[in-house]
Amino acid sequence: MCNEWSALEESTVALNTVIMTLKSNLHLPCGGAWNFLKEEEEGAPQPRASRDTKSVTPQTPGGRQPSNISAGVRPPCGHTGGILNRAQTASSLSTGVSDFGMRLPFLPGLEDPSRMPKEGSPRRTLQNNPAPDFPHLLNADGQYLFCQYWKPSRPPKALVFVSHGAGEHCGRYDDLARILVELDLLAFAHDHVGHGRSDGERLVVSDFQVFIRDVLHHVDTMQRDYPGLPVFLLGHSMGGAIAILAAAERPSHFAGMALIAPLVLASPESATTFKVLAAKVLNLVLPNLSLGAIDFNVLSRNREEVENYNSDPLVYHGGLKVSFGTQLLNAVSRVERGIPKLTLPFLLLQGSDDRLCDSKGAYLLLDGAKSQDKTLKVYEGAYHMLHKELPEVTNSVFHEIHMWFSQRTAEAGARSPP
């Protein structure tokens, strides 16, 4: 018995050693949460190392103050969703779009903002209330997704779905949505499953396809209410990968998309065969193992924006689980396979010093897509969150998006039947 116990003890120590070794090797030099997720595939096309890009004088479109922006103006499926803890009531918060950004107070009852409260009702929400007051979409799995809408004062010319990145929420895209509203576009978004105010365990998804399915469901719902309007996509980081895969799944459905540092390739300094293999092995035995939290300093050179991200209670601040990392790995592979299916116009904005999504992925996307109308602009020295970067970069990003959507919506409107 003593020998058996000693053998068990030695096996346990050995297993712990293996786990620590794998975690150590999977830990990213830059602190990124998902940039190791790229398998080195033999024979994969190699993107060009550089490309000349146009230069744009940084400026911000003037008067970006739409007269009628509303958040949660209508629940698309006849449902409404909540964001408050039991200790609060819906009347204690206004529903203005500014309340969905950085200025939200810490939600009481959430001692660990990286976790949802324990399930105490038929569905899992932050409010834990069977009668929520905020708009949401019910997905195919019965999960409630918090939705947000930015409506122009005049009839919209087009619809734009805004797809946020991993760990964040759609409220962080208020500035971009205001640009779209200024152009008489209706912007809409939801917090992906496991993000922000939506249902689900934080940064856990059964399959990456769930994100794409939910986006297409939301798009279909909006198109029933606004028939005949062209639909565009706007995505950042993981949200960019979601937009790419949604467009690849429906090649002729969307009028165009704008991508800000999309997840196409992972960081080369950590995308090694060993790390990918280790992640796959760990996913089989320890899917909930944490690989460590992201280093917020690699997100942006703008320290104020980094602090805003770090202090936002709706942003996930915990460690990336092996299971979610594996889903991102699968997404990267799917994006590479889906690129040749893209025929829609797209705008691609990328930072040269992005340490989360490899900038070479932008060239791979530009070269591999069959789209005839495609534009790439690279910002030298910029990090990952270009829309939250140094003022000269962010102003240029806003200008690029304003001009691109202005031109493409006019073209899409001219092609649409009366």
Image: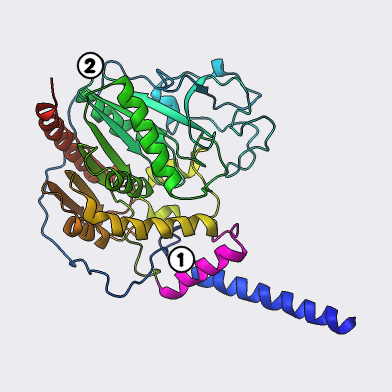
Q: Secondary structure at mark 2?
A: loop
- The answer to which quarter of the image holds residue 30 is bottom left
Please name the residue shown 64% across and 76% down the image. 17
Q: Which mark is residue 28?
A: 1
Residue 356 in view, yes or no: no
Residue count near mark 1 (Cα–Cα under 10 Å), binned few <14, some 14–19, many ≥20: many
Please name the residue shown 23% across and 16% down the image. 155
> In the rendered view, does 330 fall on the left or right side of 249?
right
Answer above or below: position of 40 versus 362: below
Magenta range is 272-293
Instruction: Return the x and y of residue 217 as percentages of the image width and height.
Output: 39, 34
> In the rendered view, does 206 fall on the left or right side of 54?
right
Q: Which mark is residue 155?
A: 2
How far, Cα to Cα, is label 2 from label 1?
48 Å
Amino acid type at mark 1: Leu
Q: Which mark is residue 345?
A: none
Amino acid type at mark 2: Pro
Instruction: Return the x and y of residue 132 as percentages of the image width and height.
Output: 56, 21
In the image shown, does 50 or 221 lie closer to the viewer? 221
Instruction: Return the x and y of residue 410 as percentages of the image width and height.
Output: 11, 29
